[in-house]
Image (tube, coloured by chain):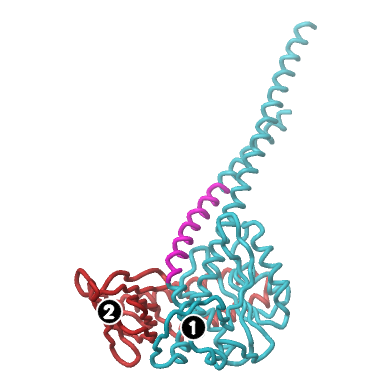
Amino acid sequence: MAENLQQVKKRIRTSNSIAQITKAMEMIAASKIKKAQSAVEKNKPFADRVKFIVQKILAENTDLALNSSFVGISKNADRKLVYVISSDKGLCGGLLANIYKQVAATVTKDDYVVTIGKKAQNFCIKNGYNVKASFHMGSSFPQYESIFPMLKIMNNLYEAKEISSVEVIYTNFKNRLVQEPVTKVLSPVERDENFVNKGDHVFEPSSKEVLDKLIPYYFEASFYNMLMNAYASEQAARMSAMSNANENAKEISASLTIIYNKSRQEKITNEILDLANGQIH
Amino acid sequence: MANIYKLDILSPEGSVFSGNVKQATFPTMSGLITILAGHTALVTNLSQGDIEVEPETGEKRNITISGGFLEVSENMVSVVADFAVRSEDINDELILKAKQYADEQRKKKENVNSEMAERELQKAIMALKVLEHNKLKRKSKGVKY
């Protein structure tokens, strides 16, 4: 019995420290989400403006879009490039499994894949996808500069006429409780049918030249937005996963404490019984 | 006051300038242009240089950009500004590293040590890049208030 008591005590200690660790991880994730949310907020006017100008140019020049290699339909090849944005670390609930499901559903073995995050890299390599390059997601907030090399791959492949479209698989951050895996088309740029064009603008030097210069900004803004979303989702998923783990650890600790107290009481009772029996005999 | 308009200078990291101005001068591909209130609707590219802002109140100030876009519409002017320094060779180097990394991973999946080393290398390259970028930024961003 004494041995058993020791063991139970040990287990209580273990579950307590697990509760502590998960609590700390939850709080770290919570603070990271706050930062991510404010960054998304700050980036929004920039991204909206860029999208607005692109849609404006497309709306005012209905013929233009089809000539540009990045806009409209230009089937250079049947192959597409897919960016898979995941996380570097696990312990974030169903987030990664959902991303993997999306990858399996949308990517064919022929497509080029660029992975961001170690988990996506491991998954794609293990399953024999055509991984062109892999980047790290990092545990801190992604920098704007970090997307330039990622998008350069897309430009290079477009110039080499190896791909016809670019898709991004990432987790969209809806709110702290809901994150959904999505596949978005980054390129070709689609016309927004709901776009309301107010007034004609003068384009200098010409609308085509403005568009050519603007398109990289458009991709950067869109892609950065997706990257930020993925980061925020990762943190949110980790926060809720850790919160659950914390609850469970506390529950286990509580039930173990009851077992411990019961068996200790049992032991004392037995000892008293032994003593009482001894006196009688 | 009809001779002022609202100017927004936006960057990916947030708003750089937002407020009413009397006039502002922008570096475009075909030279400097000054925008006053009531300018015709316009979209144009900006080249590297200084935006000279004359606010409604307060002193003139210069904001250095490395490129971007100017959009004028109905007494609202917005600039999508770019401060980032895109160094082609740094990009190329990073892509190369990422490709090599992916290849190596494919070859030796279980070799943890090499993976760790590679990760460290990646970190170091990234840090170097950020350092370089900040240096350039500080140099080029000689903002005079």
Q: Which mark is residue A216?
A: 1
Q: CA distance from mark 1 to mark 2?
A: 30 Å
Vertical side of A243 occupied by A263: above or below: above
Q: Nearer the viewer, mark 1 or mark 2?
A: 2
For the residue marked with disc 2, what is the amino acid?
Answer: Ala
Vertical side of A167 occupied by A12: above or below: above
**Chain B takes which shade in the image?**
red
Do tag 1 and tag 2 residues touch (Cβ < 8 Å)?
no
Q: Secondary structure at mark 1?
A: helix
Q: Left or right: B41 with respect to A163? A: left
Q: Secondary structure at mark 2?
A: loop
What is the chief secondary structure element of the magenta stretch?
helix
Quadrant for residue B65, please give it: bottom left
Q: Left or right: A251 with respect to B63? A: right
Q: Quadrant of the N terminus of chain B?
A: bottom left
Vertical side of A115 occupied by A97: above or below: above
Crowd around label 1: few <14 · some 14–19 · many ≥20 (10 Å): some
Q: Is residue A172 among what the camera can see? A: yes
**Chain A takes which shade in the image?**
cyan
Coordinates of residue A88 in the picture (x, y in percent) = 59, 65
Q: Residue furthest top?
A: A280
Quadrant for residue A53, please give it: bottom left
Coordinates of residue A76 in the picture (x, y in percent) = 64, 92
- Residue for badge 2: B37
Q: Quadrant of the C terminus of chain B?
A: bottom left
Coordinates of residue A87 in the picture (x, y in percent) = 59, 65
The residue under the point 60% across, 79% down is: A133
The span picked out in magenta is A22-45
Crowd around label 2: few <14 · some 14–19 · many ≥20 (10 Å): some
The residue under the point 61% across, 81% down is: A166
The residue under the point 58% across, 89% down is: A158
